[in-house]
Image (cartoon, grey):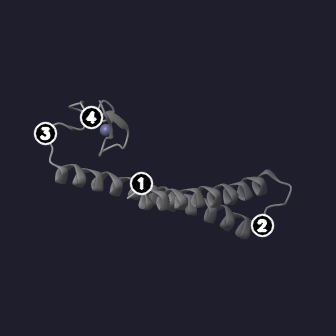
Amino acid sequence: MAIIQCPSCNKRVSSRAEVCPYCDFQLAGRSPDELEQAQQRALQRRKEKLLGQSMLALLVAIGGFAYSFLEQPHPESWQAAVSYGAMALGLVWFIVNRVRILMVKRSR
Ligand SMILES: [Zn+2]
C-alpha cells in the first residue's frame, strides 16, 4: 500500500482510498490529467487565500501607522502601544504570508 498526496487538500492518503478522508475528493477512476488539474486549482485557491491574508496584514500595519501618525498618541499611552503593536503584527504577518506564498509556488 502506498501513500499519495491528495491533489485537492495535499494531505497524505492511501493510494487505495477511493475518496480522500479529509476533503471527500474523489480519487478513484481519475485520469492523471484530471488529478493534475485538481492540484492546480487547489494551489490557486491556496495562493489566493494567502494573498488575501497578506493584504489584510498590510491593512493592519497601515492602520496602525496611520493612527499613530495622524493622532500622535502619547508614547506611553495604550493607544500608542496598540498602534505600534498593530504595525509590528501586520508587518510580521505580511512577511510570513509572503514566505508562505513563495513556498506554495516552489512546491510545484
Ligand atoms: Zn483531500
The residue furthest bottom is 69
Q: Do the residues bearing badges 3 and 1 touch, measured as CB atoms within 8 Å?
A: no
Q: Which mark is residue 72?
A: 2
Compute the Cα span from label 2 to label 4: 60 Å
Q: Do the residues bearing badges 1 and 2 touch, measured as CB atoms within 8 Å?
A: no
Quarter containing ligand 1?
top left
Q: Give the x, y percent position of residue 26.
A: 20, 37
- Hey, what amino acid is under mark 1? Lys
Determine the residue positioned at 83% across, 54% down: 77
* The quarter of the displayed image where residue 29 is located: top left
Determine whether the beta carbon of the residue marked 4 sits less than 8 angstroms from the nearest atom of ligand 1: no
Q: Which mark is residue 49?
A: 1
* The quarter of the displayed image where residue 40 is located: bottom left
Which residue is tagged 4? 15
Compute the Cα span from label 3 to label 2: 63 Å
Q: Secondary structure at mark 3?
A: loop
Compute the Cα span from label 3 to label 1: 29 Å
Q: Secondary structure at mark 1?
A: helix
Pair 1/2: label in front: 1
- Number of residues whose C-alpha sits closer than 10 Å to that of mark 2, classed few (under 14), some (14–19) or many (20 or more): few
Which residue is tagged 3? 29
Pair 4/3: label in front: 4
Image height of 66 relative to 53, above or below:
below
Pair 3/2: label in front: 3
Q: Which quadrant is the N terminus positioned in?
A: top left
Q: Give the x, y percent position of residue 107.
A: 42, 56
- Hey, what amino acid is under mark 3? Gly
